[in-house]
Amino acid sequence: MRRFEGLSAIVTGAASGIGLAIAKRLGSEGARLVIADLNQDAIDEALEAVRQAGAPDAAGAVCDVADEAAVQTAVHTALVRFGAVNVIVNNAGLMTFKALQDFDHGDWLKVLAVDVMGAAHFTRQGLLHMPCGGAIVNIASVHAVMTTPNVAPYAAAKAALLSLTRSTAIEGKARGIRANAVLPGAIDTPMLWSNPNLKSGAEKLDPRDIGKPEHIAAAVAFLASADAAFITGAALPVDGGRLAQL
């Protein structure tokens, strides 16, 4: 099934982990892709991977999502190469670890600039340039709803991202632009295993509660596709039932 035949998508943080899995899934279903990430070498490797997955065309954009000018350039890349931007997946994220009282002003701004403002910048460009039928999918987190110690800026940013998703759904509706969010749980990526709470044993995970990047990619592909044409403003947990536990 190639639900994105003739459509184009921008995926941020797409050179590895969840972002790369999303890009490969969309590409395998026919999407022409812009891979947005920080490092050109990593982008080049990701471009090869998405082409091998079946993407009919793919371009890279070195992009710090906290930089609005860089975001505009990435969107311009898609518009020039593909003629349109039909899907935006805001996946780029930053997670830092300290006790709440140890986060200073700069620490907060660093996380919020990526996890909230990065999505806001791409959302603005989406609303300016997307045609009717466009879809924005924001990668939030279960931390937006229930969290753990030592990740306050990340949890706050992901909660704000859910609010941004709702606002985008409301304001995009008249133009036929949908916005939804996915809330990953524990996903087998380097970000998960670099968590000092896990390394120290302060937080423990049942192996049954650890998902794969491909699980998130499948949810994103659904929400971005016409199969979800009547879904907007939703927040979909993809967490193996973690949030359902008392």
Image (cartoon, helix red, strand yellow):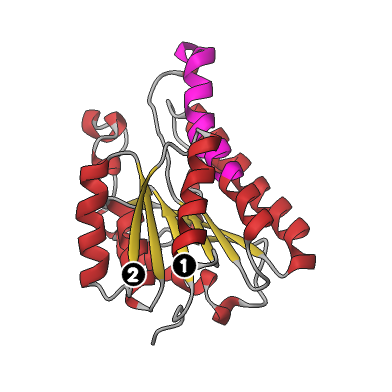
- Placement of the N terminus among the 4 image quadrants: bottom left
Residue 102 vertical position relative to residue 153 in the rendered view, above or below: above
Foreground: 95 or 92?
Answer: 92
Horizontal and vertical percent for residue 120?
61, 43
Question: Is the residue under label 1 in contact with that under label 2 (CB below 8 Å)?
Answer: yes
Name the residue located 28 percent from the left edge and 29 percent from the top edge.
Answer: 196
User: What's under tag 1, amino acid-wise?
Assistant: Phe
Q: Which residue is mark 2?
A: 57
Magenta stretch encompasses residue 119: yes
Stretch in magenta? 101-121
Magenta stretch encompasses residue 167: no
Q: Which residue is mark 1?
A: 82
Query: CA–CA distance between discs 2 and 1?
Result: 9 Å
Residue 107 vertical position relative to residue 58 in the rendered view, above or below: above
Name the residue located 75 percent from the left edge and 67 percent from the top edge.
Answer: 175
Horizontal and vertical percent for residue 133?
64, 73
| Secondary element at tag 1 | helix
